[in-house]
Amino acid sequence: MKDRKPSSIKVSIRESGLRATPARIATLELLMESPTPLTHAEVSAELDGRGVDKATVFRNLNDLVGAGLLRRAELGDHVWRFEAIKDDGHDSSSHPHFVCIDCGHVSCVDQKKLTAYIERMSNTIGEVTEVLLRGHCNDCST
């Protein structure tokens, strides 16, 4: 799904059991192209120019999560962020995120570098399902 064209996005939506409306296609396409998870407000702002209202964006985000095409994560600030579940393996399951405590920017972290530690923690305390790193991003720490 990483480099999906709109027609393959349409097929994925249909195969998930949903109608492939223009608003759903635009929503999934936007999140497929985004390098970071986006909030409802960010998705709404991007799709507003295409005539997609906030309520439709909200419903579509939740529908696409329910269909297994998006993942929803709350990264400690009580704001849901959405990201596409891609077929490239990197995003097929939950993965770590870094949140800047100054500007709020969210970045995806390569899970492979944390895998050994996460496995040790899971064996010791139970299944680790999400890892969240907080700190100061390069832009804010300079």
Image (tube, rainbow, N blue to C red):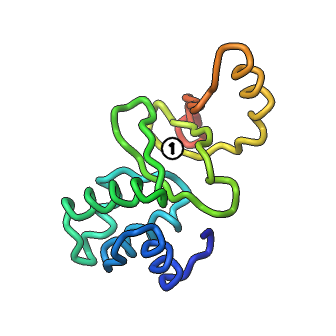
Residue 116 as seen in the image, left or right of residue 5: right
Q: Is residue 131 above or below residue 63?
A: above
Q: Residues within 10 Å of mark 1 (few under 14, many from 20)?
A: many
Q: Is residue 90 above or below residue 77?
A: below
**Residue at 68%, 53% in the rendered image:** 90
Residue 97 as seen in the image, left or right of residue 18: right
Q: In this view, does 121 lie above or below 107?
A: above
The one nearer the camera, 28 or 101, is 28
Q: Which residue lies furthest to the bottom in this view?
A: 7
Which picture quadrant has residue 86? Answer: bottom right
Residue 120 as seen in the image, left or right of residue 125: right
Mark 1 element type: strand
Image x and y of residue 114, in percent = 74, 34
Which picture quadrant has residue 87? Answer: bottom right
Q: Mark 1 points at which residue?
A: 106
The one nearer the camera, 128 or 117, is 128
Q: Residue furthest top?
A: 124
Image quadrant where one finds the C terminus: top right
The one nearer the camera, 126 or 101, is 126
Image x and y of residue 58, in percent = 26, 56
Image x and y of residue 137, in percent = 57, 38
**Residue at 43%, 59% in the rendered image:** 67
**Residue at 44%, 72% in the rendered image:** 13
Residue 127 as seen in the image, left or right of residue 70: right
What's the amino acid at mark 1?
Val
Q: How many marks?
A: 1
**Residue at 62%, 69% in the rendered image:** 2
Image x and y of residue 49, in percent = 26, 75
Image quadrant where one finds the N terminus: bottom right
